[in-house]
Amino acid sequence: MDRIYIADRTLKQAGRQMALSFREKIELSRLLDRLEPDVIELAPLENRRADSLLVKSIASAVRHAALAVPVKLNADSVAETWNALKEAAHPRLQVSVPVSSVQMEYLSHMKPAALSALALDTVRECRKYTEDVEFIAEDASRGEESFMLPLIQGAMDAGAKVITFQEAAGAMLPEEMRDFLKGIISGLERKEDVRFGIDCSDAMNLADACAVATILSGIRELKTAVYPLDCASLPHVVGILATRGEKLGVFCQTRREELRRVTGLVENLCRAGSGGAKGFESAGLAGDEVGLTAHDSRDSVIRAMDRLGYILSPEDQEKVYQAFLSVSEKKGAVSLKELDALIAAEALQVPPAYTVTQYVINSGNGIGAFAHMKLDKGGEALEGLASGDGVIDAAFLALEQAIGRHFELDGFQVQAITEGQKAMGETIVHLRNEGRLYSGRGLSTDIVGASIMAYVNALNKIVFEEEEA
């Protein structure tokens, strides 16, 4: 029996159709890897710093599946993508090229001969870094064979080990798809040296059927998604192969027993898709999950910092570690939430670029929350007005309006550190800028005031690093 390779596109589509936060994307990659698909696909690098950090973080989280990242048609993009991907257990580079005249005209703005030469040069460039190179013929069902066949053959000769046909229109019936691909593949030489794949649009709700039908044409890699997207469904395809795989003479190794539970978790995460603060629990980092003690090594504590998503300098790592030792000697085990608070208090303490001079918050059961914020930046008065979904949201939006910038709110914690009616509250705010995580800490008997202090504390750390860069 032949093996069918399963590639999951959920993460690749997440950046386009779902506003998932950095931390949610890491958690999604871990959930997908539990299914042990053969490939997990990621989106291309658009923001060099933030996206590179995301790919590196996912590469460290995924242990079973290959990680596939598309490159642009130039050597610089290949090198940059590889630098982010190279630590993955199984890295794959993807070269995608439109092969239909309509997409070549509107997407690439290039003549067929020039596009073909550039695509083959890019495949050769990718092969300098890895043997796992995938060539994707975009919109193949509307491509002209006179252009498509020589290009695909050239990609095979240049070293591509996976050739994927993309059916973007979603207008073919399963039998038509099967016969179309059978004809294309029969016109290629040295077919035994590569694996052929398919990516079907679900425009007519036939992606599952079309994907399975192409197996009869020699297709051995199917692009799917756990979360419903415009492609074949991973749960459906795996279910079909489990039931009819023997008849087709094929099998796949994706863990079907994990599928139902993980599918539910992935769907919940993707439906949320708000990109706002979800807290540690939503990211699988429960506060009491880790209990570090003074007996744990320095490396163990630093790994826990990395797990929280921070990239700290050696100096800041040492500051946090010393603070950790002081706390752990007094109270024993230190949880992730407590370690996170130590990072906010000890790491990257900087002179304040912004200070809050005045704020007013209005809210009540008959009116929406409204915030008026005044800040000072080097003698310059800044002012912001905003309404929001609650007083904290309004305050943060007013701060953003005052400074003229927006940051991803990656986490928000509130806890009481003293008791009674005048209890002191501590807030931790996590802001993400260009992929890096910054935390701020605020202490006050007023939770709103503590939250504003924490936000501005994190903001000042971002500004300091930008000015130092």
Image (cartoon, helix red, strand yellow):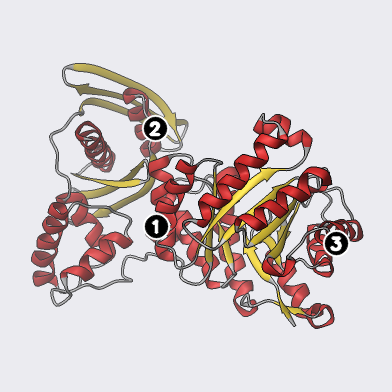
Instruction: List x then y, in percent, for residue 169.
Output: 80, 44
Mark drawn on residue 406: 2
Disc 1 designates what residue? 57
Mark 3 neighbour class, 10 Å CA radius: few under 14, some 14 to 19, many 20 or more: some
> Of tags 3 and 2, which is closer to the observer?
3
Mark sitting earlier along the chain (3/2) = 3
Instruction: List x then y, in percent, for residue 336.
Output: 28, 64
* Residue at image coords 74%, 66%: 191
* Residue at image coords 37%, 45%: 435
| Residue 402 figure quarter | top left
Q: Mark 3 belongs to which amino acid?
A: Lys
Q: CA distance from mark 3 to mark 1?
A: 39 Å
Instruction: List x then y, in percent, for residue 222.
Output: 70, 64
Of residues 316 and 21, the one nearer the viewer is 316
Mark sitting earlier along the chain (2/1) = 1
* Residue at image coords 81%, 64%: 214
Mark sitting earlier along the chain (3/1) = 1
Mark 1 neighbour class, 10 Å CA radius: few under 14, some 14 to 19, many 20 or more: many
Q: Is residue 127 left or right of residue 464?
A: right
Determine whether 246 is above or below 380 in the image: below
Total numbered badges shown on the rendered structure: 3
Disc 3 designates what residue? 182
* Residue at image coords 67%, 65%: 194
